[in-house]
Image (spheres, helix red, strand yellow):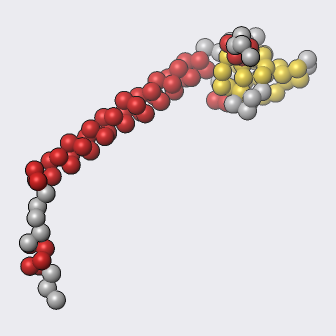
Amino acid sequence: MNLLPVLMQAPSPAGGGSMMWIMLIAMFVIMYFFMIRPQNKKQKEVANFRKSLQVNQQVITAGGIHGVIKEINDDHVVLEIASNVKIKIDKSSIFADASAANNQPK
């Protein structure tokens, strides 16, 4: 059975497929402005926050631990989470400034 005559009789899409390309490009542009661009902006804000960490600053880790920074090294931070209780965590796990979180109404 030869399918060549059947395939040759199939109608071609209107506009030669250019409408499909326009829709694909439009979908990419929409995804860029609603998903990719805001995520990149948020990542830059977090990176700037981590660069500006200071000793005696209250922070929250990604795991939800509240503490005060006692020592800052290249890739890790020493947090005091209670009186004379210190933990060493990775700098990338610091999530937010605790002083801003403590001032929010409950």
74, above or below 16, in the image: above
On screen, residue 3 versus residue 74, left or right, reads left
Quadrant of the rendering where the N terminus is positioned:
bottom left
Q: Nearer the viewer, residue 94 or 88?
A: 94
Judge whether residue 23 can be spotted in this image: yes
Q: At which x and y percent is residue 105?
A: 72, 13
Let me know if residue 76 appears in the view. no
Residue 36 left/right relative to 77: left
46 to 18, vertically: above or below: above
Asked if residue 18 lies left or right of residue 73, the reply is: left
Question: At which x and y percent is residue 33?
Answer: 36, 29
Res 27 quadrant in image: top left
Q: Nearer the viewer, residue 40 or 14?
A: 14
User: At 20% from the left edge and 46% from the top edge, which residue is drawn?
Assistant: 21
Residue 70 vertical position relative to residue 33 in the rendered view, above or below: above
Which image quadrant: the C terminus?
Answer: top right
Extreme-right residue of the structure: 84
Residue 95 in percent (x, y) is at 65, 25
**Residue in the image at 21% along x and 49% along y:** 20
Residue 102: percent from left, percent from top: 74, 14
Task: Name the residue: 78% across, 27% down.
Answer: 65
User: How many numbered marks have been drawn onto this rendered protein structure?
Assistant: 0
**Residue at the image position 69 percent from the left and 22 percent from the top:** 73
Residue 26, quarter of the rendered image? top left
Would residue 46 appear left or right of 68 to someone viewing this image?
left
**Along the line of sight, the residue nearer the viewer: 43 or 34:** 34
From this viewpoint, which residue is outermost toward the bottom?
1
Compared with residue 62, is residue 99 higher up or lower down, i.e. above or below? above
